[in-house]
Amino acid sequence: MKILVTGGAGFIGSHVVDAFIEEGHEVVVVDNLSTGFKENINPKARFYEISVVDKGLSEIFNKERPDIVNHHAAQTDVRKSVDDSIFDAEQNIIGSLNVIDNSVKHGVKKLIYASTGGALYGEVENPPADEGHLISPLSNYGVSKYATEVYLSVYTKLHGLNYTILRYANVYGPRQNPFGEAGVVAIFAGQLLSNEQPTIFGDGSKTRDYVSVFDVVRANVISLTKGENEAYNIGTGIETSDKEVFDAVAKIVDVKIEPKYASARPGEVNRISLNSTRAERELGWKPGVTFKDGVAETVTYFRNHL
Ligand code: NAD
């Protein structure tokens, strides 16, 4: 099959591209390199440097005629979404709508959308949250990611578009940006390997659900043939605190550095984990990489790439 991957130069998208190519598919990457890197792009993929917001996207669809679209391109910085909600909406709502609209116009058989679980459900009282949990975002990023989900369901009713939505937990692994705002496994690994003292915002007890990028990739591969017009949480259901992440990374890096603590950042939930039993039941997906193994693999990557 021919698959067009948006955001294929980024952390998750580039691993998805590698897996599709490994499976024998032809892959076209669309990315504006705003946070992605050319070096991440599999040399067997055809690359177009263009924003998903750009009207010229339709020429690429027209020329390439993809069977499947896998949409990973997004503005992913939660704090930026709060500081500049219009930019966030342009990239994540208008950009996604341009991708969805072109998919319908050019007869794409299916659109796989990388959504978020962590930023949709808001504060979760009794984690893990399943897909039926109240949608109550605490950031504009959560709003823009969810708006795209709603458009997808409307485009199905209006135009018969076929889609799968994957709501990721906190994804970690090789190629995550260690200098970014989010992604504490990569940030702590980068800092500890450089003998810097990492900062934990809050008292270290805030929890997240960490899912390996390789498990996320597998969910994308399965979605090529399964998951009819449905949203699936892709997480482990396990809560890991910031301090536990720090300790796990420090142990593998093998350094004796204690973290600094700073005040908690506003707009962040205290606890979250995702219940992925729907994905297990309907997609046959469940996480396979333990946090310990995933952290070790990530640290090894950063040892070789920092
Ligand atoms: P990333 O920043 O590494 O990847 C995003 C990619 O999209 C980059 O290559 C960037 O250059 C590209 N991009 C951004 N805006 C674009 C535009 N307007 N046009 C074309 N390309 C554009 O981030 P990531 O962590 O790999 O995230 C990928 C997707 O997964 C995003 O949609 C994000 O919302 C979603 N997601 C990520 C996580 C996580 O924990 N990393 C969790 C939930 C959902």
Image: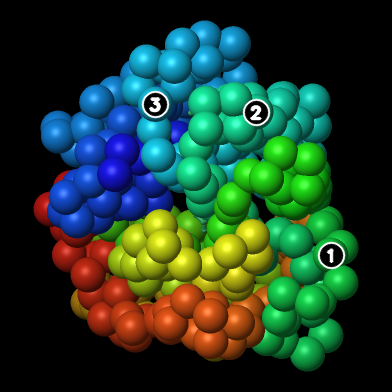
Q: Relative to residue 108, is residue 117 depicted above or below?
A: below
Q: Is residue 293 left or right of residue 111?
A: left
Q: Relative to residue 176, is residue 223 depicted above or below?
A: below
The tag earlier along the polypeptide, 3 or 1, is 3
Q: Residue at x 24, y 55 (%)?
A: 19
What residue does disc 3 label?
65
Dot 1 amino acid type: Ile
Label 3, label 1: how many angstroms apart (C-alpha)? 35 Å
Q: Is mark 1 within 8 Å of ligand 1?
A: no
Question: Is residue 88 at least partly visible in the picture?
Answer: no
Q: Is mark 3 within 8 Å of ligand 1?
A: no
Q: Secondary structure at mark 3?
A: loop
Res 263 quadrant in image: bottom right
Label 2, label 1: how many angstroms apart (C-alpha)? 25 Å
Q: Residue at x 72, y 81 (%)?
A: 129
Callout in the foreground (3, 1):
3
Q: Which mark is residue 272?
A: none
Q: Nearer the viewer, residue 159 or 297?
A: 159
Q: Secondary structure at mark 1?
A: loop
Q: Relative to residue 47, is residue 276 depicted above or below?
A: below
Location of residue 48 in the rendering, given as x and y in whole percent from the top left corner: 35, 19
Location of residue 46 in the rendering, given as x and y in whole percent from the top left corner: 24, 26
What residue does disc 2 label?
101
What residue does disc 1 label?
135
Res 293 quadrant in image: bottom left
Q: Is residue 161 left or right of residue 218?
A: right
